[in-house]
Image (spheres, rainbow, N blue to C red):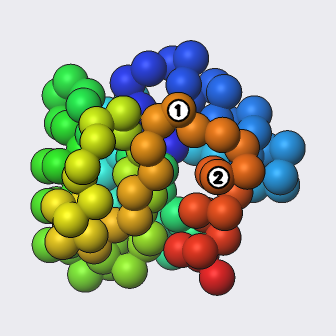
């Protein structure tokens, strides 16, 4: 889970842990890349939930970096954003898109689609 909004991270973490997922939270793309690039972290990551607007490193830059890294490229990404009309750009960045507000059923379905 990569989002600079601590409340959003906590809410989504609660939803996902209720479904049996282990959740790692990071506040920006740079922190997420650092975590994922540590030995064997990427191989245990089944999905990345990503906000677009964050300080330090935004979601677009994270997607560019992830797509350049052969170890990270296969990890599915679901972009969660309140911005409308981004599906074409997000698809071009090899990610899925879920508009805010995020409802638990929609989140579970989005993850199910990219993970299975």
Q: Is residue 34 visible?
A: no
Q: For label 1, count other residues whose C-alpha is less than 10 Å away and answer few (under 14), some (14-19) or many (20+).
A: few
In the image, residue 91 sits, relative to residue 17, either above or below, namely below
Picture coordinates of residue 30, whole percent (x, y): 25, 41
Q: Secondary structure at mark 2?
A: helix
C-beta proximity under 8 Å, tags 1 and 2:
no
Cα separation, mark 1 vs mark 2, equals 10 Å
Image quarter of residue 45 = bottom right
Residue at the (21%, 65%) spot, across then down: 88
Residue at the (73%, 51%) spot, across then down: 105
Q: Is residue 17 left or right of residue 40?
A: right
Picture coordinates of residue 35, whole percent (x, y): 40, 49
Q: Is residue 58 visible?
A: yes
Q: For label 2, count other residues whose C-alpha is less than 10 Å away and answer few (under 14), some (14-19) or many (20+).
A: few
Q: Is residue 93 left or right of residue 98?
A: left
In the image, residue 81 sits, relative to residue 6, either above or below, namely below
In the image, residue 13 sits, relative to residue 93, either above or below, namely above
Picture coordinates of residue 26, whole percent (x, y): 44, 35
Which residue in the protein does label 1 denote?
101
Picture coordinates of residue 41, whole percent (x, y): 49, 63
Residue at the (63%, 51%) spot, across then down: 107
Mark found first going from the N terminus, 1 or 2: 1
Image quarter of residue 28 = top left
Q: Secondary structure at mark 1?
A: loop
Which residue in the protein does label 2 denote?
106
Residue 68 vs residue 85, the one in the foreground: 85
Q: Classify the position of the C terminus by image quarter.
A: bottom right
Residue at the (46%, 51%) spot, across then down: 98
């Amino acid at each position: 889970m990569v989002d600079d909004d601590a409340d959003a991270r906590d809410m989504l973490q609660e939803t996902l842990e209720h479904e049996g997922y282990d959740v790692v939270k990071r506040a920006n793309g740079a922190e997420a890349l650092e975590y994922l690039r540590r030995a064997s972290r990427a191989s245990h990551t089944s999905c990345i939930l990503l906000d677009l607007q964050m300080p330090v490193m935004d979601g677009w830059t994270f997607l560019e970096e992830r797509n350049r890294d052969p170890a990270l490229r296969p990890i599915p990404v679901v972009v969660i954003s309140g911005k409308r009309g981004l599906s074409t750009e997000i698809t071009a960045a090899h990610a899925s898109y879920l508009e805010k507000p995020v409802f638990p059923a929609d989140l579970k379905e989005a993850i199910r689609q990219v993970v299975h």
